[in-house]
Image: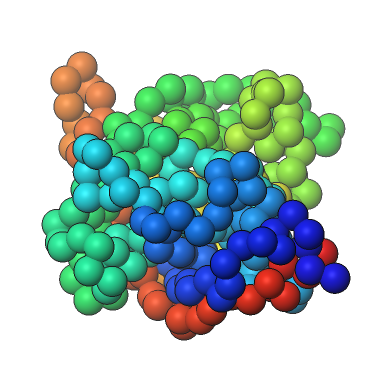
């Protein structure tokens, strides 16, 4: 039967399905409120279920902002609210441009800060909030292995593990253990496995909130590029290839006291389809 918690919503609810390098999202124009705040997390969880509903890595609700062109509420597939999403930010920017919500260049508000974006057809470039909380050469014991990881917050926390064979890395098994490791508690971390890929770098990510490997993670791509550069293995712009085989570019500048600033992530944002959710999308 339909989820009774949602039965009194006004149906149908228009939405778009979009993806950025294989990271897929449901996006809803929520400038006129449709879903009460206390129900958003459960709504996201139900809609993001694969096979039973639309299926996605996350849900974006676009809302008015007093300090930018608009703001978002972003929920992971498990219903947890997150501060930032790089691939999602590119999709949201293109959604806003397609629907006349904002013109390019645009600024939008997230829990991580203000994001700037320019849209050129399907190619979107975002300027992210400044990265912080760099940690290098941190030893960690997991599954009987002694590993060395590096950390940075690119809007959400990430750790980076360099591997020799990216194709055979145990992204799900080892990633899940590292994501929940006490060193990164209580909220955990996203886990990126980074290895050479042609002239650039490849990255595979176990995403917190999705609790699985995703085809791409924008903030993880940025984390991998910044850590590679900080370790002397890359220079800006850094070419990164996602698990889905899509290339993304990370560009940045070195600011005061060797800090990193003007971090830009460039790549595709594709409109997959437009649709209308019915109450049956929330069958529980």
Residue 105 in sight: yes
58 sits to left or right of 83: right
83 sits to left or right of 55: left
- Residue 21 image offset from top left, x and y in percent: 44, 68
Of residue 154 and residue 72, the one placed in the foreground of this image is: 72
- Residue 188 image offset from top left, x and y in percent: 65, 31
Vertically, is 28 above or below 36?
A: below
> Residue at coordinates 79% horizontally, 68% vertically from top-left?
2
Of residue 270 and residue 205, the one placed in the foreground of this image is: 270
> Residue at coordinates 73% horizontally, 22% vertically from top-left?
182
57 sits to left or right of 110: right
Residue 199 in sight: no
192 sits to left or right of 171: left
Q: Quadrant of residue 102?
A: bottom left
Vertically, is 177 above or below 85?
A: above
> Residue at coordinates 44% horizontally, 43% vertically from top-left?
84
Number of numbered labels in the structure image = 0
| Quadrant occupied by the C terminus | bottom right
Of residue 85 and residue 61, the one placed in the foreground of this image is: 61
Q: Quadrant of residue 50?
A: bottom right
- Residue 33 image offset from top left, x and y in percent: 45, 55
Vertically, is 2 above or below 144?
A: below
Q: Quadrant of residue 233?
A: top left
| Quadrant occupied by the N terminus | bottom right
Scheme of colours in the image: rainbow
- Residue 252 image offset from top left, x and y in percent: 23, 42
Of residue 262 and residue 161, the one placed in the foreground of this image is: 262
> Residue at coordinates 68% horizontally, 37% vertically from top-left?
179
């Amino acid at each position: 039967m339909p989820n009774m918690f949602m039965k009194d919503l006004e149906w149908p609810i228009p939405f778009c399905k979009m993806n950025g390098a294989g990271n897929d999202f449901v996006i809803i124009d929520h400038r006129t409120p449709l879903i009460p705040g206390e129900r958003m997390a459960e709504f996201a969880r139900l809609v993001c279920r694969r096979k039973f509903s639309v299926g996605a890595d996350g849900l974006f609700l676009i809302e008015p902002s007093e300090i930018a062109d608009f703001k978002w509420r972003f929920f992971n597939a498990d219903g947890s609210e997150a501060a930032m999403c790089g691939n999602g930010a590119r999709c949201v920017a293109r959604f806003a441009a397609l629907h006349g919500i904002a013109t390019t260049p645009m600024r939008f508000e997230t829990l991580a800060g203000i994001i700037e974006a320019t849209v050129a057809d399907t190619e979107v470039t975002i300027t992210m909030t400044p990265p912080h909380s760099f940690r290098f050469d941190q030893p960690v014991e997991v599954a009987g292995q002694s590993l060395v990881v590096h950390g940075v917050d690119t809007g959400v926390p990430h750790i980076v593990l360099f591997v020799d064979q990216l194709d055979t890395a145990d992204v799900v098994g080892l990633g899940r253990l590292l994501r929940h490791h006490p060193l990164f508690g209580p909220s955990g971390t996203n886990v990126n496995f980074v290895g050479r890929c042609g002239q650039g770098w490849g990255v595979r990510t176990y995403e917190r909130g999705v609790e699985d490997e995703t085809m791409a993670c924008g903030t993880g791509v940025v984390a991998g590029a910044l850590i590679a550069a900080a370790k002397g293995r890359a220079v800006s712009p850094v070419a990164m290839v996602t698990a889905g085989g899509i290339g993304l570019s990370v560009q940045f500048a070195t600011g005061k006291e060797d800090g990193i600033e003007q971090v830009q992530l460039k790549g595709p944002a594709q409109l997959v389809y437009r649709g209308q959710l019915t109450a049956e999308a929330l069958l529980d």
